[in-house]
Amino acid sequence: MGEIKSTIDLVMEKTKGLSLSEEEKRHLKEEEEARKAQVHVKRYLKGDLDLEQLLDQGRASSKTAQKTMIHALVEEGLKPGRESFSRALSALERWNPDGPKSSLKRLKDFSLMYAKALQKQKRKVKAQLWEELAARGVEGSAVEPNVLASPLWEETLRKMEREVRSQLEGIREEVLRDLLGSLH
């Protein structure tokens, strides 16, 4: 009776002697570099990698990996209300110091405008929470509402993000166009 072979054994027999073309090898290498670039950006945005380390990785990478890093910084880092926004902005400003400045200036201006609006809304929510607490008989100099844990604050954040989404998207596209264009 014949030996029963596993699927992996059958695949290994069929592919024995086959090899990848140079184009396939290059493509696989680019995909691997792109994955590594995304990991570096995620680590940077989380604070596990400092800016200089990220920039060093970018400078030592291929153009494809650099493009992936820029895309990841813009797509993952530039979301309103996120802590990663300022980290992503810093990295993009330092990525190509001699490159285009207008889109990055617009991005920085947007960031400042959004931060001011956020603080204004935070004060409004805090006032509303104080009123709610006072209506329940909870008041005094020691009472400090926890705005960030409030469902009202979460709702306010979502509303603000919806309001600025299209404006930010236009700026993000401009930043991508400028920075990716400067790589050629």
Image (tube, rainbow, N blue to C red):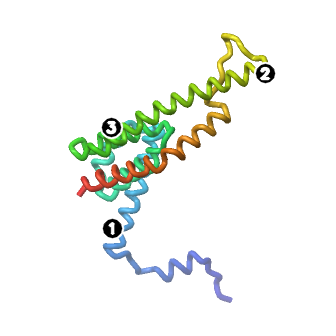
Instruction: Say few, some or many: other residues with alpha carbon within 10 Å of mark 3 (under 14 / 14 to 19 / 20 or more).
Output: few
Residue at image point 33% right, 46% down: 57
Where does the C terminus fall, quadrant-wise? bottom left
**Residues under labels 2 and 1: Cα distance?**
67 Å
Residue 63, above or below 55: below
| Tag shown at residue 98 | none
Mark earlier in primary sequence (2, 1):
1
Given this view, does label 2 or label 3 mark the residue nearer the observer? Answer: 2
Viewer-side residue, 172 vs 2: 172
Instruction: Determine which residue is flagged by label 2.
Output: 136
Tag 1: amino acid: Arg
**Residues under labels 3 and 1: Cα distance?**
28 Å
Residue at image point 31% right, 40% down: 105
Given this view, does label 2 or label 1 mark the residue nearer the observer? Answer: 2
Tag 3: amino acid: Glu
Residue at image point 32% right, 73% down: 23
Secondary structure of residue under mark 3: helix
Instruction: Say few, some or many: other residues with alpha carbon within 10 Å of mark 1 (under 14 / 14 to 19 / 20 or more).
Output: few
**Looking at the image, how many numbered discs can be counted on the residues?**
3
Mark earlier in primary sequence (3, 1):
1
